[in-house]
């Protein structure tokens, strides 16, 4: 088993805060949006907690962004510029998730320090981190103080449009987080990826037959 340092501590710290924060935001957001569905706290407290955690997550996002912009780890998010190569690699990954994984086939994507996302993950995380998260934050700030940001709210089509966009992205993230948790269990053991992201930073990569012997020579 080969160990590769893939998740530096700043990334793991960001992930810890993000994980807890997003769960809290989903719970309080559900109580605010769908009054009576859940009652974890008073409505006023739910709004206050939702707002404060939202600002914490916005700050956390900028920590993540600055880390990647000012280190060579930004290479992790470099897109594949060849549509043909990206489509073929994504199709192989889809085949693996669809039935290869159930037959014990090897993962077609080999993780490395600068290539930790498979083609499907790469496309998804670029959309999530550079489009949906900023859009969620912007609409959230506008809804936090509608009167103060009246001009911006009006520019984007009014409160109803801003609120609809915010809620639709929230619904997406509810499903995304459940899917994310499932995907995190698909390592060589159900907890391997969680251990790497939350504790050690090291991903354990299963060596192909003969690879270990060749490395020793």
Image (cartoon, rainbow, N blue to C red):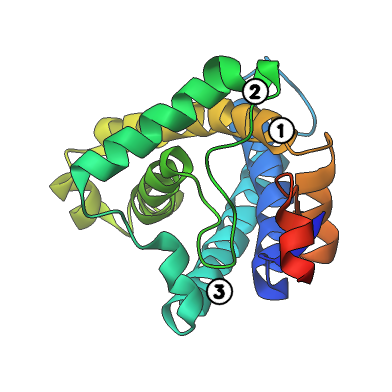
User: Which is more toward the observer, 12 or 61?
Assistant: 12
User: Which quadrant holds residue 4?
Assistant: bottom right
What residue would you read off at disc 3?
63
Distance of mark 1 from mark 2, alpha carbons? Answer: 9 Å
Q: Secondary structure at mark 3?
A: helix
**Vertical relation: 56 (above or below) 20:** below
What residue would you read off at disc 2?
101
Q: Residue at x 68, y 16 (%)?
A: 102
The mark nearer the N terminus, 1 or 2, is 2
The label nearer to you, 3 versus 2, is 2
Q: CB of mark 1 within 8 Å of CB of mark 2?
A: yes
Res. 183 visible in picture = yes
Left or right: where 134 falls relative to 188: left
The label nearer to you, 1 versus 2, is 2
The mark nearer the N terminus, 3 or 1, is 3
The percent coordinates of residue 118 (x first, y second) are 49, 45
Question: Which label was assigned to residue 186?
Answer: 1
The label nearer to you, 3 versus 1, is 1
Q: Residue at x 73, y 50 (%)?
A: 210
The percent coordinates of residue 160 (x first, y second) are 28, 30
């Amino acid at each position: 088993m080969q160990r590769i340092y893939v998740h530096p501590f700043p990334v793991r710290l960001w992930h810890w805060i993000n994980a807890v924060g997003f769960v809290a935001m989903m719970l309080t957001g559900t109580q605010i949006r769908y009054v009576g569905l859940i009652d974890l706290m008073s409505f006023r407290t739910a709004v206050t907690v939702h707002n404060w955690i939202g600002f914490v997550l916005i700050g956390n996002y900028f920590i993540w962004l600055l880390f990647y912009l000012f280190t060579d780890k930004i290479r992790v998010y470099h897109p594949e510029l060849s549509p043909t190569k990206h489509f073929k690699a994504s199709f192989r990954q889809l085949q693996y998730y669809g039935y290869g994984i159930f037959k014990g086939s090897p993962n077609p994507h080999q993780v490395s320090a600068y290539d930790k996302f498979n083609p499907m993950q790469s496309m998804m995380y670029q959309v999530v981190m550079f489009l949906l998260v900023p859009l969620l934050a912007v609409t959230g700030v506008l809804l936090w103080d509608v009167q103060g940001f009246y001009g911006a709210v009006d520019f984007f089509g009014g409160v109803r449009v801003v609120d609809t966009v915010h809620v639709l992205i929230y619904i997406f993230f509810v499903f995304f987080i459940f899917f994310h948790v499932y995907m995190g269990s698909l390592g060589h053991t159900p907890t391997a990826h969680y251990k790497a992201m939350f504790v050690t930073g090291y991903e354990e990569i299963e060596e192909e037959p003969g690879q270990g012997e060749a490395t020793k020579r």
